[in-house]
Structures are given as C-alpha cells and as structure tokens.
Amino acid sequence: GNSVTQMEGPVTLSEEAFLTINCTYTATGYPSLFWYVQYPGEGLQLLLKATKADDKGSNKGFEATYRKETTSFHLEKGSVQVSDSAVYFCAYLTGGGNKLTFGTGTQLKVEL
Amino acid sequence: GAGVSQSPSNKVTEKGKDVELRCDPISGHTALYWYRQSLGQGLEFLIYFQGNSAPDKSGLPSDRFSAERTGGSVSTLTIQRTQQEDSAVYLCASSPRWGSSYEQYFGPGTRLTVT
C-alpha cells in the first residue's frame, strides 16, 4: 500500500555538522512531496515541498530533491544549528490532493 | 492574520465519555482536514472537508468518530464512548483549496487523554 519510510531517530549532531534524513515513498502516480517540521511545543509547519520529479525544494538552508527513479526525497542541510532541533516529517499528497500521508518522524538533536 | 486555532488545548476524559474537539480554520480556507498524532500510529489522516462537497471520511478509525463542518467554517470532531486507544493529539489543518499546490496549515492540536 501507500506509505512513507524515513530513518528512525533520534539523530544527534554537533552544531555545523552536515545533516541527511532519508525518506522514501511508495505511491502510485506522481505525488507532491513535503517535509514538515515540529519544533518543541509547537505545531507542524511546512518546511519545503516539491511537486514534480527533479524539483528541488529549499528553505532555511534545508534542501530536498524529488527523485522519481528512486522514489526518494531526502532532506539535507550543510550546517545545522542548535535551533534546528525538532522532529522532521516526510509526507506526500496524492493526486486527489485531499490527504497527507506522513512518515513516522525523525527527531533531530543538535548540540554545541 | 490568525492561524488555525483548536480548542481545548488539552482534554482529559474518562473512558466511555463523549468528547468534542473544535477547529477554527483560517478565514477563507475552503478545505479542512483532521489528523491524529499518536505514539503507536504516527500521524494519520482522519477526515477531510472541501466546500459543500461530501466529506472524505476514509480515515476515521471507527463509527465512534464523526465530524461536521458548519457553514463551511468551524469544524467539530466528536468521539463517542472514548477508549484509551483514542488518546492522541488531534490536529486540524486548513488550506485555501484542496490540491497539491495548496499548503496545509496546521493548528496547535488538542491533546486528548482517556483515563
């Protein structure tokens, strides 16, 4: 069935380290892909998105590229900060556009 | 402008009681979604409303769950005869319209604890 698989956390990094959080999806057609972030004590916020193959979404130094051939949408950041500590969710929206399917979330902890 | 608001922020109820959770979407947004975030199941879609169309109820876990949206704005999610497995954070989101081009804006959630 349709699903999103993302790497389990927690991921603990030192400040300024390189970040990769893997995400792969199983879905029919060409879904739109998203990364959402949930900072401690706050609600879900859209971090970035890509709506077609080879698109790159970017925001706040984070990037992810829609790879149709590998059904992946890995999140990367070149230099993380303590303020990036949060839970990151990969998700896709079906062609019907009426619901998001989420991964289980990856907790990121960035330490000084 | 104001974002999506939900009330109450926390709700503790006894097993077997009914609860109502409220969502106020962003003004002018025609699409409204309910999701549930729980430790065992992650983030799950529950139900979706778009304008005056029939809602998509495909994610509701049982017939104890229902939702309505009055006047195309405020929505209420009702859980009857609550069970401990209903304990979760219930999230509401809205978007200008349905479709992949439209971001879903999430509210802060209602944390439901069934004792």
Image: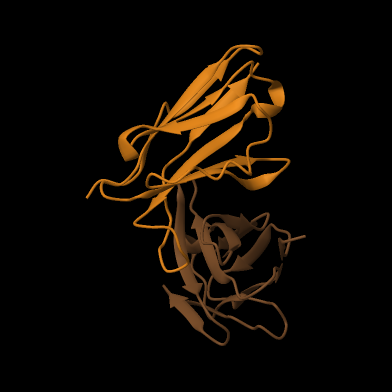
Q: Which of A84 and B64 is in front in this view?
A: B64
| Relative side of A46 to A33, left or right | left
> x and y percent of residue B22 in the render?
41, 29
Q: In this view, does B67 lie above or below A96?
A: above
Q: Nearer the viewer, residue B63 or A6?
A: B63
| Relative side of B3 to A24, left or right | left
> x and y percent of residue A1 in the render?
77, 60
Residue found at x 56% / y 70% = A33
| Relative side of A31 to B49, left or right | right
Outermost residue toward the left in this view: B1
Q: Is residue A37 above or below residue B41?
A: below
Outermost residue toward the right in this view: A1
Which quarter shows the C terminus of chain B?
top right
Coloring scheme used: by chain
> x and y percent of residue A7 in the render?
72, 64
Q: Which of B102 and B49 is in front in this view?
A: B49
Residue B44 visible? The answer is yes
Q: Chain B is drawn in which colour?
A: orange
Residue found at x 48% / y 26% = B10
